[in-house]
Amino acid sequence: MVSSADFREQIGHIPIAREGVPYIAAGVFLTVVAALAAPWIATWALAGLTLLVAHFFRDPQRVTAAEEGELVSPADGRVIVVERVTEPRFTGNRCWKISIFMSVFNVHVNRAPFSGVLEKLYYRKGGFRAAQTDRADAENEQNWLWIRSDSGLDVVVVQVAGLVARRIVCWPRPGDWLERGERFGLIRFGSRLDVYVPEGGEMAVSKGDRVVAGESVLWRTK
């Protein structure tokens, strides 16, 4: 995990996430070396791989136009779970759980679902099973964020590593204020995010929906 006294120092690389720069630079270097000393097929293969890595770490600007009381998606991807559960880590409240699966082709920069104080963080080491499976909940590497708004609304966001993912990145620390739609972290190379929202609100998505981080509304207060 990566953190900073001012986590916004970590998010200044647009349109490429800061964490992707070393990977892209390494790919460019190896491509140049291959062009000078290796067969052309190796050069093209490395160039293609470098472009794929750059595509993975893309970090486009997003416009958050949600209204007051609306919670936006923290991730790009497909909704794979919408169900009522008990939040297991921080609050113990009955709530809705929304799970969003990010393939390697999605933007992997994560955004705050609403404005509030980061009350607590919990990081757990684990395995790297396919993120869309039930076993990923119990066994995979995870990072939990408990966010509380000024009105006392509690939302928990969980970054879950996947089959290919090997690094969860989270910039803010407990006590930091998050603005709805701003970047707070990323997961490298395929993963999933779980969002626990109060049971009493109104769901705005269904299983199978495609969502966009910082823009798509997941849930709203009644």
Image (cartoon, helix red, strand yellow):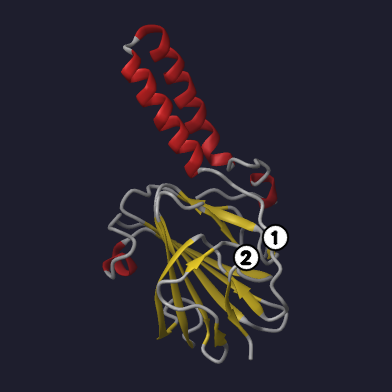
Q: Is residue 32 left or right of residue 176?
A: left
Disc number for residue 53: none
Residue 102 horizontal/vertical position (percent): 43, 58
Read off the residue under disc 1.
63
Asked if one can make out residue 124 in the rendered structure from this viewpoint, the answer is no
For this rendering, which residue is in front, 30 or 61? 61
Residue 20 horizontal/vertical position (percent): 52, 38
Residue at coordinates 31% horizontally, 53% vertically from top-left?
163
For this rendering, which residue is in front, 198 or 1? 198
Asked if one can make out residue 66 in the rendered structure from this viewpoint, the answer is yes
Disc nearer the start of the sequence (1/2)? 1
The amino acid type found where label 2 is placed reads: Glu
The quadrant in which residue 35 appears is: top left
Read off the residue under disc 2.
215
* Residue 27 higher or lower than 181, as above or below: above
| Mark 2 secondary-structure assignment | loop
* Residue 173 higher or lower than 115, as above or below: above
Residue 114 horizontal/vertical position (percent): 65, 71
